[in-house]
Image (cartoon, grey):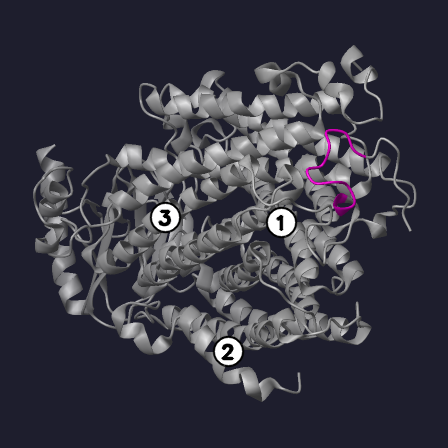
Amino acid sequence: MSSTTIDTHPHGHHEEHHAPGGIMRWITTTNHKDIGTLYMGFALVMLFIGGAMAMLIRLELLQPGLQFLNPSFFNSMTTVHALIMVFGMIMPAFAGFANWFIPLQIGAPDMALPRLNNWSFWLLPFAGVMLLMTLFMPGGGPAGGWTLYPPLVLQTGDAFPFAMFAVHILGVSSILAAINIIVTIMNMRAPGMTLLKMPMFTWTWLITAYLLLLAMPVLAGGVTMLITDRFFGTSFFSAAGGGDPVLFQHIFWFFGHPEVYIIILPAFGIVSEIIPTFARKPLFGYAAMVYATASIAFLSLVVWAHHMFTTGMPLGGQLFFMLSTMLIAIPTGVKVFNWTATLWRGSLSFETPMLYALAFLFLFTLGGFSGLMLAMVPADIQYHDTYFVVAHFHYVLVPGALFGVFGGTYYWLPKMTGHMYDEKLGKWHFWLTTIFVNVTFFPQHFLGLAGMPRRIPDYATQFADFNFISSIGAFGLGASQLIFVWVVVKCFKGGPKATAQVWEGAHGLEWTVPSPAPHHTFDEPPVIK
Amino acid sequence: MKNRKRFLPLALAISGLTSASPAWSDLALNMTPGVTAMSREIYDLHMLTLWICVVIAVGVYGVMVYAIINFRKSKGAVPAKFTHSYTVEVIWTVIPALILVAMAVPAARTLIKMQDTRGSELTIKVTGLQWRWQYDYIDDGVRFYSTLKRDANAARKKGSGVDPKTVENYLLDVDNALVVPVNTKVRLLVTGSDVIHAWWVPAFGVKQDAVPGYINEVWFNAETEGTYRGQCAELCGMDHGFMPIVVRVTSRDQYKTWLASQRTQTSSLAQAQ
C-alpha cells in the first residue's frame, strides 16, 4: 500500500488532501469508484467509435451498388466494429458497474487488489488505440471478421501483429479484472453476507468472472498460435503443413461461446436488480435464479461447435452440440419466467431503468427464440452466416446487453452523481432507442431467411427494401444515443438532489450510503441482518 | 393464469408484430421451401420451430403485458409478498424440456438423412477460390471455373455509374453455371484452395464450408428443372460478396448433350496446351 492510502482514515473526506489532483488523480487512482467511472467513460467513447463504424456499414448498405466504401474497408469496418463493441464497449461497461457496485453491494471498502485494478483499466486505452491504429496501416485494418478465422486472417497486411497484440492486451485486462472480482467477492463480503444473500448483480458477476478465467486464456492461446503461424513458420492452422484450419474455430468458439454469456450475464444481474425495485416486490425464486445462472455458465462451455455446423462435422458431433445448445433454453427460460413472476402482483412504476429492464425482457426473449431456431442443425444449415444470424445476435447484444448497460446507468446514476437524471429525456432516449432497434434489426430476420449472406458490402436487388429500412433505423438508433450523452452529462452537472435510497423500492447495501456515494465507503463493515 | 382469455387478443397482436408470418412468404419474408426433399424438410422444421416459438411468445408476452397493465402503482396496486413457489418452478422447468424433446426428435431425423451421401449417381468436386468457384465432374473429365458475370462485375465497382437495378440478376449470375440432371442424387465434394469459402444454394438446402485441406461431402436431389442461385456464405476476403453460385437443373437428355459439348471443349483445350 502506498503512503497515500495508509494515511486514509475512516472519516471519509480528508483523503483528498493526499490524493493527487487533476489528470494524475485518474492515472494513479486505486479507488474502485474512480476506476469504475473510468471504465464507463471509456465504454461510452467506444460506443460512439464502434457506433460510427456501424453507421458507415449501414450507409454502404442503404442501397445496392457500392457508393461509399471499398469492399476491403467495408470488411474492416464489420471486423473492427465487432471487436470494439465486444471488447471495448460492453465488457468495460460491465466492468465499470462491477467496480462501482460490487464493493457497495457486499459492504467492502474497495476491491481486493486496488493497484491491479488500476492496471486492468489502463491497459484498455492502449489496446483500444492500437486496434484503431490498424485501420491506417498499409494493407488496411483486420478484415477477416472478428472471429479471426485462418487462413483468411493471415492475409491481413501490416496490421496483423498489432491487431493480434491488441486482442492479447484486451484479454489480459479482462483476466486481471476477473481475478480481482473473484477475490473481492470471496474474501471481502461483510460479516453475515453469505453467498446466498448476495445481490443478483454480484452473483452474476462472480459467475461471469469464472467464465472469463476459463475462456480468455483459450483465446490467448489461439491468437498466439496465429502469430507463430504467421511469423515463426508453424502450421497449426495450415493444411499444407499438416495443420487444420478448423482447429482454430474450435479454439475460438471455446472462448467465443462463453464470451456470449460473459456479455449477457451481468445484464441479467442488472435486470434482476431493477425489476424487484420497480415492482416493489422481492425477486421471485432467488435461489433458482442463482442456480439457473450457474447452469447457463456451465452449459456455455459445452456448446461451442454450434457455431460450426457447416464445417463438415460428423453426425455425432452435430447431434451432441444441437442437444446441448437446446438445453440452454431451460435455465434461460427459468430466468425469464422468474422475472415475469416478479412483475406478477407487484406494484409497478415505469421510470427509465424499469422501461429498459422491461424492453430487455421482451426483446432479449425474442433473441432467445431465434437462438432456439438456430440450434436446430438442419435449419441452421440455411440460417448460418446469413442476416438471420446478424438479427439474432444483435437482438441479444443490443436490447440484451446494451439495454442492461443503459438500464443500469439510469438506475445507479443518482447514486454515482448525487443528482436525479432528467426523467423526461431518459424516456425520450428509451422510446427512440427501442423503436429504432426494432426498425434496424427486425427486418434483418427477413433478409436472412430470403437468402442474404452476412458480411457482404453489396447485395442483389431483391434485398434492397429491407436493407433500406434497416439503414434508416440504424441512423435513428445512432442519433438517439446523443440524448444519452446529454442525460449523463446533465446529471453529472446537477439536478434534483438524490436521497440515499433513491428509489422507493430499492433494497440493498448500496442504497444505505449517501448519494453521491462518498469516496470511501464501508471502512467499517456494515451489519447484515 | 385464470385470466388468460382476457389478454390473449393483445398478446396475439404483439406476437403478430414481432414474428414472421408464413402467409407473406411470397414477398421473400421467409425461407424458401426449395426444390429438394431435404430443403422441404428443413423448411417444415423451420416452420415448426417458428410456430412453437410464436405459441410460447404469446403465452409469455401475454403474461408480461397483463402484469404491466394491471399491477401498476398508479392504479393503487399493492405488492404481494410471495418470493417463490416450488411447484411452478418445477412446472416451468419440465414443460420446456418436453417441448425441446419434441423439437429435437424431428431435427435429428432430418439430420441423419442429410448426412447420408450413399447411392449418388453423379459426383462433382467443388473448389472455392478467391473469388470464384471451380467445378470438376471427376468421372467425366469436365472441369471449368464459374465467375461473376461481366456486366454485374462492371456495375458493382465503386463509381461505376451503373444502376444495379438495370442489371439482370445483379450479383447472382455467373459466366459458367453448374449443370446437373433433374431427379438425380448429386454428391458434391467441397474443398477450398486458399481460404475458407462456403457453397450455398438455398433452394437445395445445402450449405457446406469449403475448407482447405478438407474434402466435405454433401448431396442434393433436385426435383424441378430450372435455374437456382446462391452465394458464398463464408467471409473469404475482399470479394466475398461477389462469387455467386448458379446451378442449372436440366432434363437428363439435355444434361447429356451439355456434357458432351463440354467434353469436346475441355479436350480441345487440353490439346491446345
CA distance for labels 1 and 2:
29 Å
Local SS, label 2? helix
Closer to us: A142 or B84: B84
Q: Where is A1 relative to B158, above or below?
A: above
Q: Which mark is residue A411?
A: 1
The magenta span reads A510-521
Q: Estimate how packed mark 2 is, as few (under 14), some (14 to 19) or many (20 or more) residues with alpha carbons within 10 Å.
A: many
Instruction: Give residue A191's quadrant in the image.
Output: top right
Across and down, in percent, residue A301 comes to 66, 47
Across and down, in percent, residue A268 comes to 64, 53
Chain under numbered label 3: B
Label 1 and label 2 in one chain: no
Relative horizontal placement of residue B223, taking residue A499 as reference (left or right): left
Across and down, in percent, residue A480 comes to 40, 48
Instruction: Give residue A344's quadrant in the image.
Output: bottom right
Local SS, label 1? helix
Instruction: Give the residue type at disc 1.
Output: Tyr
Instruction: Give the residue type at disc 3.
Output: Val
CA distance for labels 3 and 1:
53 Å
Q: Which residue is mark 3?
A: B190
Which one is earlier in the sequence, the residue at label 3 or at label 2?
2
Q: Which mark is residue B11?
A: 2
Kindly check if marks 3 and 1 are in contact, taking CB atoms under 8 A apart as contact: no
Q: Where is A165 relative to B177, above or below?
A: above
Closer to us: B9 or B218: B9
| Magenta portion: prevailing SS class | loop
Chain under numbered label 2: B
